[in-house]
Amino acid sequence: MFPDKVFYEPASLDYALGKHLKQKYADIPWVPIESHNNIEQLRTNSNDQFARMKRHLIIGVRKSLTHTPNHKVSDFLVPYTSSGCSAMCLYCYLVCNYNKCAYLRLFVNREQMMDKLIKTASRADKELVFEIGSNSDLVLENTITGNLEWTIEAFGKNEKGCLTFPTKFDMIEPLLPLEHKGRVIMRMSVNPQEIIRKVEFGTSSLDARLDALDKMSDAGYKVGLLIAPVVLVEGWQALYAQLIDRIADGLSQKTKSRLFIEIIFMTYSYVHRAINNEAFPNAVELFDKTLMTGRGRGKYCYRDEVRSSAEQFLRDQLTEKLGGVPIVYVV
């Protein structure tokens, strides 16, 4: 059952969404907290409690609303209605920020966040794109709050700007009938099914993700594909060749004609290794000292020559099988 317990800032119950969630989850324990950022009884848990803590839900009021400039597929990264996630991908970059406390946090002051989005979009002298899903998976969050449905319809009342979000989930049926006005971009994150099964615990299957991408495209949404993160496990060439075959053969022609691709290589860290070794002792080891090198404090990335070779392999495969689809960046 998810969630098994709710930790909440009492001020969150002053908001309509907070009241709704209190009623929705009235049958499970609610524990008051001073701040969603520092729940001592969870922060001091051992690493082997990581998966158990992912069953908790944290509800609060988002304080920081600062939009951060971005230069990939959006103009700004926007702090939005959630951070963290209930899934347990072994490489999750949110773990770098939140350590073992990378559980799902919901923020109930969505009207305040939407007001700033609309004002920023309306005042700009060009069409801005806002990344609203950089800290969480909004398709997953939507199953709890309905926030993504609310967001698409509320933002659609404005005449300027676009929203974008990535996801690893296929629960997009509530989004299909919405009046999005072509100003919402969903980017589906994909990996070979073997990596999804062994590394991306609690997420949708590859087939379900690609099916969801087609449905969103059919509903008129703009769509992108994230091959992310690229994980160089044993036999990765065959796995990623099969993935690109599956994308080329499985997606509709309509989707492929509108698609763009982002490629992101995995960054790992000492924190990931510490948590994974204790929380998932039988899981695959993602750190490979023969392929990786240090990057900043406590982080690892693939060596330049390894990454360059892998990038060329992926570009060659994509050119051969999806030659008309642009690759907007590789990092």
Image (tube, helix red, strand yellow):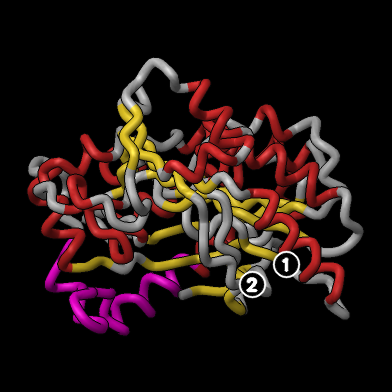
Inspect this view and state whether residue 212 appears. no
Which element is circle 1 on? strand
Residue 298 magenta-highlighted: yes
The amino acid at mark 2 is Phe
Q: Amino acid at mark 1?
A: Val
**Coordinates of residue 57 in the picture (x, y in percent):** 38, 37
Q: Which residue is mark 1?
A: 129
The residue where tag 2 is placed is 76
Residue under the point 36% across and 53% down: 35
Mark 2 and mark 1 in contact (Cβ < 8 Å)?
A: yes
Return the residue nearer the eye: 225 or 290: 225
Q: Is residue 78 toward the left or the right of residue 153 in the image?
A: left
Tell me if mark 2 has few (under 14), some (14-19) or many (20+) residues whose alpha carbon lies within 10 angstroms of its own: some
Residue toward you, 224 or 326: 224
| 265 over 25 or under it: above or below | below
Specify the quadrant that holds the N terminus.
top left
Crowding near pointer 1: few (<14 within 10 Å), some, many (20+)? many
Magenta segment: 287-314
